Image: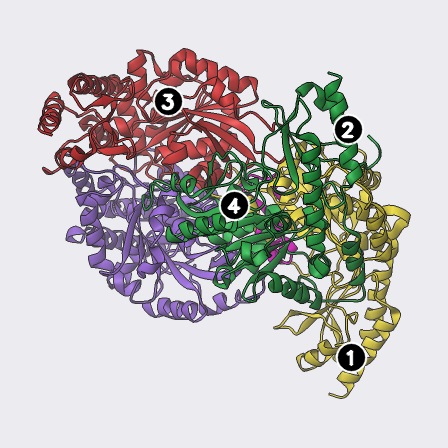
Chain colours: A purple, B red, C yellow, D green
Amino acid sequence: MKENRRGFASDNNAGVHPAILEAMGAVNDGHVIAYGDDPYTSKAEESIRQHLGEDTGVFFVFIGTAANVLGLSSLTRSYNAVICPETAHINVDECGAPEKFSGCKLLASDTPDGKLTVEMIASHMHGIGFEHHVQPRVVSITQSTELGTVYSIDEIRQIADYAHNNGMYLHMDGARISNAAVALDRNFYEMTGEAGVDVLSFGGTKNGMMYGEAVVFFNQTLCEDFKYRRKQGMQLSSKMRYIAAQFDAFLQNDLWKTNALHANRMAQRLYLAVKDIPGVVVTQPVESNAVFAQIPPEIIPGLQEQYFFYVWDDDRSEVRWMCSFDTTEQDIDEFALLLRSMLSSE
Amino acid sequence: MKENRRGFASDNNAGVHPAILEAMGAVNDGHVIAYGDDPYTSKAEESIRQHLGEDTGVFFVFIGTAANVLGLSSLTRSYNAVICPETAHINVDECGAPEKFSGCKLLASDTPDGKLTVEMIASHMHGIGFEHHVQPRVVSITQSTELGTVYSIDEIRQIADYAHNNGMYLHMDGARISNAAVALDRNFYEMTGEAGVDVLSFGGTKNGMMYGEAVVFFNQTLCEDFKYRRKQGMQLSSKMRYIAAQFDAFLQNDLWKTNALHANRMAQRLYLAVKDIPGVVVTQPVESNAVFAQIPPEIIPGLQEQYFFYVWDDDRSEVRWMCSFDTTEQDIDEFALLLRSMLSSE
Amino acid sequence: MKENRRGFASDNNAGVHPAILEAMGAVNDGHVIAYGDDPYTSKAEESIRQHLGEDTGVFFVFIGTAANVLGLSSLTRSYNAVICPETAHINVDECGAPEKFSGCKLLASDTPDGKLTVEMIASHMHGIGFEHHVQPRVVSITQSTELGTVYSIDEIRQIADYAHNNGMYLHMDGARISNAAVALDRNFYEMTGEAGVDVLSFGGTKNGMMYGEAVVFFNQTLCEDFKYRRKQGMQLSSKMRYIAAQFDAFLQNDLWKTNALHANRMAQRLYLAVKDIPGVVVTQPVESNAVFAQIPPEIIPGLQEQYFFYVWDDDRSEVRWMCSFDTTEQDIDEFALLLRSMLSSE
Amino acid sequence: MKENRRGFASDNNAGVHPAILEAMGAVNDGHVIAYGDDPYTSKAEESIRQHLGEDTGVFFVFIGTAANVLGLSSLTRSYNAVICPETAHINVDECGAPEKFSGCKLLASDTPDGKLTVEMIASHMHGIGFEHHVQPRVVSITQSTELGTVYSIDEIRQIADYAHNNGMYLHMDGARISNAAVALDRNFYEMTGEAGVDVLSFGGTKNGMMYGEAVVFFNQTLCEDFKYRRKQGMQLSSKMRYIAAQFDAFLQNDLWKTNALHANRMAQRLYLAVKDIPGVVVTQPVESNAVFAQIPPEIIPGLQEQYFFYVWDDDRSEVRWMCSFDTTEQDIDEFALLLRSMLSSE
C-alpha cells in the first residue's frame, strides 16, 4: 500500500485537520494551571455550551470509550443495567470497559439498522423491583449509529420519553454526532438536550480532531461529583489546554460542519458509485459517512491491498467503508473504478 | 498575574517543547491504521527499546496515573497489596484509581524524604499466606520522588532484590525519570531494568511533552495480556501516531536530557538563591527539579499572586517550587529577589 | 394460604432434611479453630473428594451465587467473557454479581431448553486476539438446567472439548446437580471432572441442606489462590464446621440421592397428572424436578393462593412448578385435582 | 490438644448456644417463601427494631465482613474514603474486601487502644473538594474494638457529631456489640442510633450464633437500594428463616446479654488471674471479653499446645486471649495455673 494512502478503514485513520493543529500550537505559550483550571479550558467549555445549552456541565476526557464509560457510571450503581443495541460501541468495541468500570450489565437488543426502538427497550423491562435482577437505569443510543444510520429527532424524543417515564436516563454516544447533525440539518442541541438526552459523549476525533472528547450533562445535578469520577477514571489531562484548543477550533467557523458535510457527501458519492455494480449489495441506508455493503469474499484481500477497510461481518461477507473529512472525490472515483474492475474480471 | 506567566506550580504547567509540537505536525499526513498499528508507533516503540532494552514490552497510554494503575493491575490480583511511600502519587494524587481499578490495597510507609527503604517494606510483610490479609505483591517507588529526591542505583537494586526475594515485583513511577537520570548521570536502563525494575511508567509530559506515557515491561511474560488491559482501561488512543511522534522526538537528539538538565539546573539555582534568605528553610535535598521550603505563611498569598506555586503542607507552611524545561534564569532571579524583599519587609 | 403449606415455588422453599439438622447439632460441642481449619471441615472435604476425585480442590462458601461468581472469577481476568445460556442463573438471577465481581461480560445465547450447544458457543468466538473485544475464557452450563432439562454426559464432553480446544474452561453450575445425577443414573464425577468440567459449583441447599455450597476445582493449579478470593469475596464462614457437617451428612448414606430421586419422581408424577388436562401445555421435557407449563393466565392467581409458585414468562403465561425432597404424593395429587377443577370450571 | 478443647483463640471458635440451635430446628417445618419474604424473617426484623428503633432498615447477611463491606458500599461512591483505626477489622482482616467491593480507599490511623478520636479523624480531612484526592465519606469504628476496649457513649457521640458536621456518616462494626453493651450497661440503641451511628453491622456469631449478621440503617433513606446491593454482594440467603430464627432467639430472654456478661466476666477473671504473674504484662484495659498481654516468646508454643490462642504482635510478643459465652471458670483457673507454672519454671 502506498505510504499513508487514504483508505476507508475508519474516520480515525485520518490525520488532524490543519486548523486544529494550528490552534494547538497557538496555546503553547507560557504557563497555565494544569488539569483544566486555565482560561483556554474555560473558553472551550463556553464554546460547547453555546452549542449545547448554557446550563450544561462539560468535562473533557481523552477518548470516546472513556466518555461513554464515565458518563454511564455517573448515572448508575453497580446493580443497574444499561439498555443498548447489540451493535453499540459500548457493547462490542470497548473490551468490557463499561462492565469493568461501572459493574453494570448491558442488556443488548438485536436491531436491523443499529437503532434502538421503544419496543426493544420495553422487552428488557422486567424484574423491576425484583432484587435478583439487574435494574435498568440508562438507555444508550449512538448518533449516528455504528451502522451509519441516523435517528430522527422524533425517534430520539420517543426513546427519551420512554426512558424518563420508566425512571431511566438517556445517554447518547456522539462519537459521530457531527455527521448526524449535518445529515438531519439540525443543530447539536436539537438532537440532544432538547430531544431529551441526559448525558452526551461529544466527540470530534473522528471528524478532524487529534484526541479529546467531552462528556456533556444536560442536567447539572447529574454531574456534581463527576470531577472525581474523571480523575479516578484516569481521564484528567494535566495539559488540558491542548484538548480545549482543539474543541474551540472544532466549533469555530463551523469547522465541525464543513468536515462532516464533506465526509457525508463522500459517502453519498461512494454509495452512488457502487450501488449498481453487479456483485455489490449495499446493506444499510447511507445516512451519514459510512457505506455498508456485501461484496464477494474473494475480492476483499486484493481490494484491501489498495485501500484498507474492515470486514464487518465475515459470515455475510459484509464490509464497512468509512469516509472522512479528508476523503477526496478522486479517492472515491478511483476506488469505485477498482472495485468495478475487480468484479467484472471475476 | 501576567498572562501565562511562568511560575513554580508544576512542571506540567509548562507548555510543549517546540520540537515536540513540530514532530506532531510532521506525522499528520494521510491515513494510517488507528490504535497503534502504524509505522510511527513502531518507530517510537523502537526508540524506547533502544533506551530501555530490546526485550521490553512497550505500551503507550494517555497519562501517568493510567500508566501506574494499569501497570500495577497487570502485576496483581485484587487480593494483593502494593507497598509504597505515603507520599506516592499512587497513594495521594490519583483519587483512589489504583484501588478502584485493581481492587488492591495500598500499604503506605511514612518516609522522611519520599524514598522507601527495605526496612519500611519489611514492616508490611506479615500475614503472608494468611487469607485474612491482603498479600503484598508489588513494591512501587517513584524516581525522582514526589519530594524531589533521587534513589541511587544501589538503593533501587536493594529494593528490587528484596522484592524479588519475597515474591514481589518492583514498579517504578517514572513521571520525572529524566530528571533523575540526569541527576545520577546514568542512562534510563541502568536505573530501571538493570537495577531490577519490572515495570516502569515512563513519562515525558512533565519534561516537555503534551500527553502520553509509556508502560514499559522488562519481562515480557508480564505483559502478554496488557493490550486488553489498556483497552479496557480506556487508554488506547485511536490516533496513536501523535503520541508516538512525541516520544520519538523526546528521545531524539537527547531532547529529554537537555530539558531535564535545564530544569534541574534551575532548581539548583533557585536553591542557592533562597537557601540563605532568613525565614526560608529548605526541607529536602535538592536533587532534581524541585525545591521544598518552609516560609512564613503570611507571605504566601502575596508571593502566589506573582508566581503561582502550591502549598505542600499547610500545617508546616511548607511550599513546593518546581522548575521546568522552560524556566529561565531570569525567572529564578526575579522570584528570589521578590521573596527576599517580602521577607525583609516583614 | 395454610401456614407453611408446601407449594411448588422452589426447592429452596423447603426446610432442611432432619438428618442434616441432626448432623449440625452433632458437631456443636466445644471449640474448634475457626475458618475451616478444623477436623469437621477436613472430613467433609474428604467426603466430597470421594465423590468428585482425590485431586480436587474443595472450598466451602455460603451460596450458589457466590460459588458461581468466585469460581468464574478465579478463571478469568476482567477483559474476559463468559459464554452461557440466556436463561443461566448467572445471567438473570444474580443481580449482575458476575459482572460486578469479575468485571467480565457475559455472552448469552438463546436456547430452546436451557442447554448450550457447541454451535451456540462458536457463534461468540469472534474478535479473538482483537483488543477491542472481550476475550471468551469460560463456558458456563447448569446441570440440571434452569428449565429442568439435563445434559447428557456426551453433550457435556462435547462442550468441554470445544472449550478446551479453544483455550477456554468449562464451569458447571451444579445447584441441582443431584437431580441431574439421578436423572442420568450416573455419579457426580462422571458428569463433571471425567466429562471435562474444570470448576463446579456443587450445591445442596435445593436438595435438603440449610446453606453452604462447595466450589470444586478438578485442576488444582486453578485454585492456588482461591482462599484469598473466597475471603475477599466475603464467603469465608468463621464457624465452618456447620457447613461441613451438612455436606458430610448430605453425602452419607446416599441422602443426596434419596432426596433427589424423590423430587424427580414427584415431578414425573406431576407431569403425568397434568399433561393431559385441557388448557395445560407442558413446555419442557420433564427430566429432573421441574415442570414448566403454559396455563390460562386467569387461573394463576387463584391457584397461587392455594399453592405458591412462580410465573416464569408472563407473556406466554408459562409457569414453573418445582418439586422438592419433601413434596408428597398427596401434594401432587391434590394440586392436580385443583388445577383440573379450575380449568374445567372456566 | 484434647479434642475440641475450649481455648482462647477466638469467640468464634466456640460452638452455637443450645437455645439458638433449638430455635433453628423449630422453624424447620414446611415451606416458606425463600429469600426473606417469610414470617420468620419479618419477626426477627421486628425483634431487632425493638432493640434498635422502629424506623430502622434491617437486612440479614451471612457474615460480619459482608455486613461491613455492604454497609460501607451503600454509603460511598468509589472515589470516597473511609476513615478507620489501623487495627480495624475492615483494614486488616477482610483481605481487602472493602477496597475491592466499594473501590474506596481506607484512611487508617494508628491508635494506642483501637479507638479513633476526633483528632485522628481530623488529620485525614484534607484535599476536600480537590479531585486528585479521595473524599472522606464515612468514619468506621468498632464497638467493642478489636483490642477489647469500649467506646463510651460520649466518645461515640463526639465522633458522630464530627462526622456529620463534615458531611460524613458514622458506621459501627458491632461484631461484639453485645460485649460492649453489657460493659457500658446500656442498651443497643443508646450506643448506636441515639449516639449518632448511621449504619451498624449487628453481629451475634461471636456471641453464640452460628452464622448471620444484620446490617441496620438508622436512616432508611440510606438503604432504599440495599436489597440490590445485598443480592449482588452474594449475601442473600435463600433459606433465610434459619438466620431469622437465630436472631430471634438471640434477642429473646436476654440471651445476648447473658452470654456477653458471662464472656466479659470470664475476661475479668482471666485478667485478675494473670495480671500479677511475673512475666505477664497486660497491654490493654480489659473492658470486654479480651485480654491482651505480653508474655515471654519462649513459652508461647507450649502454652498454645494446651490452649489455642493467637499471637497478636510477634515483634512485641503480645498475645490475645478471647473469652466466649461457653468459657468456664475452670478453664480460666487451669489456664492461669499453667501459665504461672510455665513462667515460674523458666
Q: Which residue is mark 4?
A: D141
Q: Check disc 3 and report the residue beneath it.
A: B112
Residue at 24% x, 34% y is B310
Is residue A279 in sight in this rendering? no
Q: Is residue A323 magenta?
A: no
The chain holding disc 4 is D
- Name the foreground residue: A162 vs A311: A162
Amino acid carrying label 2: it is Leu
Mark 1 highlights which residue?
Answer: C339
Dot in front, 4 or 3: 4
Q: CA distance from mark 4 to mark 3?
A: 30 Å
* Residue at point 18%, 37% (across, down): A32
Judged from the image, the secondary structure of the residue bearing numbered disc 2 is: helix
- Quadrant holding the N terminus of chain D: top right
Q: Amino acid at mark 4?
A: Ile
Look at the numbered discs 2 and 1 and tell me whether their residues touch, using CB distance below 8 Å. no
Q: Chain of mark 1?
A: C
Q: Earlier in the sequence, mark 2 or mark 4?
A: 4
Residue C82 highlighted magenta (yes or no): yes
- Give the CA distance from mark 2 to mark 4: 36 Å
The amino acid pointed to by label 1 is: Leu
Foreground mark, 3 or 2?
2
Q: Which mark is residue D337?
A: 2
* Magenta range: C72-98
Chain under disc 3? B
Q: Is residue D180 left or right of residue D247?
A: left
Mark 1: which secondary structure? helix
Residue that lies at the very extreme toward the bottom in this rendered image: C345
